[in-house]
Amino acid sequence: MHSLIRPNAWVGLKLPSGSTKIIQIVPDTTISLGKYGAFPANLVLGRPYHLTFEVLDKTPEEAFSRLRIVPASELHAEVIAEEDEAEGKTTAADRDANAVLTATEGEEFSLVDEQGNIVARSGREVIDDSAIQKLTHDEIEELKREGNNAGKDVIAKLMLSHTALDQKTTFSLAKYKLLKTKKYIRRFQVVPIDVATFAQWQLEEKDASKIMDMRAEMFGLVGCWGNVHYGGEDSMIDDPHSRTDQGEETCVPIQPDELKGRWLVVDDTCGMLVAAMAERMGVLYPKEEEGEDATVAEQAPAREAKREVKTDAQTQNGTAQENGDVDMVDVVPETTVPERPKMTTTNKKQKVRPRGSDFAIPFSQTNTLTVIHSTSQPNLSLLNYWNFDITAPNHPPHPLLNHLLNLTWLQLLKPELDTSYSTEPPTASAEELASWKPSRRGNFHRKRRRFARTRYIVDSTRAGNFSGLVCASSMDPISILKHTLPLLAGGAPVAIYSPSIEPLAALADCFSVPRRTAWTSGNVPETVGKSLEELEHWEGNEQFPLNPTLLQGVSIQTSRARRWQVLPMRTHPLMTERGGADGYIFTAWRAKPAEGRVEARGKFKKIQPSSSKKAAKIDGEGTPAETPATGEEEDSATVGKRKRADTLPPLDTEGTPAPENAATGDVASPTKKRKVDGEAKVEEV
């Protein structure tokens, strides 16, 4: 993000009323702030962000209002005065007459009448302000039209004309002064357009449904649970240097090992979700070149001087016309007023990059966003506020040009049905191409470039190995995950936003423990005999819409907490709170199921039903195990009996030794019966 205000940049103007106005700083134009006045756009070009400006009054010699930078000491004069008084440096009598008085935290003020009854408490004034204000509405409007001292004179006269000002408490006086200051002071602050500021402006002052009622913290939560971060240095693809008489055989092959730091996006918020993710990845704002902002700052005085000269000439011309003189105004020499440079950013000549071949891929293999959409062109219109237009054919340099890829659902699921992917690009020799008209040659190169880029985007997306999936769409999330889950790498996070909880609850039920248990126990006949890859791309049925083993750690959460007024018989949400959807987020992690069945290893306990006393078992290492009934260890005599019993040859049903082994010819040794722990055992004689 640039530190200075640049030409044609979108900025936010914070007004005293608390609202924010999003405008574009176009050079040589006038910016209107409504009741706060208007000023030339050139006066803020080249200035740093976060400065507070004050719109001054017009002078008789000028046709526009100038700006004054309000210093920090003036903005925080009241806080500084309170701190000085607390430290004993000043007293309350030394304060300025226009200073705003504030109540100490935790302190309560009240106003009482002659009988001692409380009339007002902590700013709740019962006196009618309209009856005690000497200035009429017409007089106040006249003061506003005169526009003296950027509205501060109007505030001062209102304070002096208030007959009951001495009856107000400290809290009430501070509140009264603050309200009048917000209403009449002509100040504004210039802030850069980031995702949080723009989301708040779109939510409160524009159409909230355009971004699916997503609040600023929701964009942060989705990016956090999606683990969206900087994916590493760009890894560009070499130019294949294909000739015009070569076809698709020269297309760049996909290298899955080089595809890293890539996120899959399904965005129905007009590009706000993409902007939030691009901001976290560091590819939303153009990189600031060395000395670039310094050049912009140097050009600002030249633009301002040119406007001053133009205004002086207009003033002189108007005066001459009033006197009946129509003489031309003398032309200002070129040496006094530098002309506005043709380039809006720097005076340096842009380097003309050599044009690559038709099949050259401009996209990076790392740190990319792949957007899946259902129309011919994705709706990312809100990215225009960050000077990126996805529909522009010859877009100026921008980080998103190399890191934002898009494809349709048709290209992802059945690319052979898409003509831009399956149609072979045309070929022509250099001699034949030279004989064509320029328009035909342009269409020839455009079709070949579109084919190469579409082929690369589709093939790289279908290759999978994405680092995460982030979704904010009105589509059914089950249908989205059915085709996007196989594209994620192992351990990749999944974050899905929905204005309501019902679609996410249905999705979470697809990965519940009972469904996973039924799946792994083999109760789904359709999955018998299929490999892991086939199960990952399984289309599902009514009982199992998705493979329940593909996601782990499924949860649903929300961050909105409505404030309530809790009073006797009057408990309800605050009526001044904003409505709209609460918004919920589904989070999970991609799992790679192990091939085959998982077998448990360890100590096993078996209850002998025929024994009155529970028989203890020995593990493979010969250590005594605990009995199921009492948890006590076996004594050494019992362990010895158990070992001898395990080494005896098998017996037939009557307890006699088994016959000799037909394979080896061995004869069982003489044995005798013995009862060990209530069971018939046989040991050697």
Image (cartoon, rainbow, N blue to C red):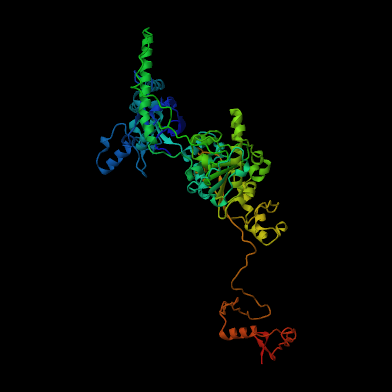
User: Residue 90's image quarter?
Assistant: top left
Residue 496 lies, in percent from the top left, at 57, 47
Q: Residue at x 55, y 55 (%)?
A: 491
Q: In the figure, 614 relative to 409: above or below?
A: below
User: Residue 598's image quarter?
Assistant: bottom right
Q: Is residue 231 left or right of residue 604?
A: left
- 538 vs 231, nearest the viewer: 231
- 282 vs 106, nearest the viewer: 282
Q: Residue furthest front?
A: 431
| Visible residue check, residue 507 | yes
| Visible residue check, residue 567 | no
Q: Is residue 31 left or right of residue 259?
A: left
Residue 311 lies, in percent from the top left, at 37, 19
Q: Residue furthest top?
A: 324
Residue 508 lies, in percent from the top left, at 61, 52
Q: Which image quarter is the C terminus in?
A: bottom right
Q: In the figure, 562 relative to 651: above or below?
A: above
Residue 375 lies, in percent from the top left, at 63, 37
Q: Which image quarter is the N terminus in?
A: top left
User: Residue 55's image quarter?
Assistant: top left
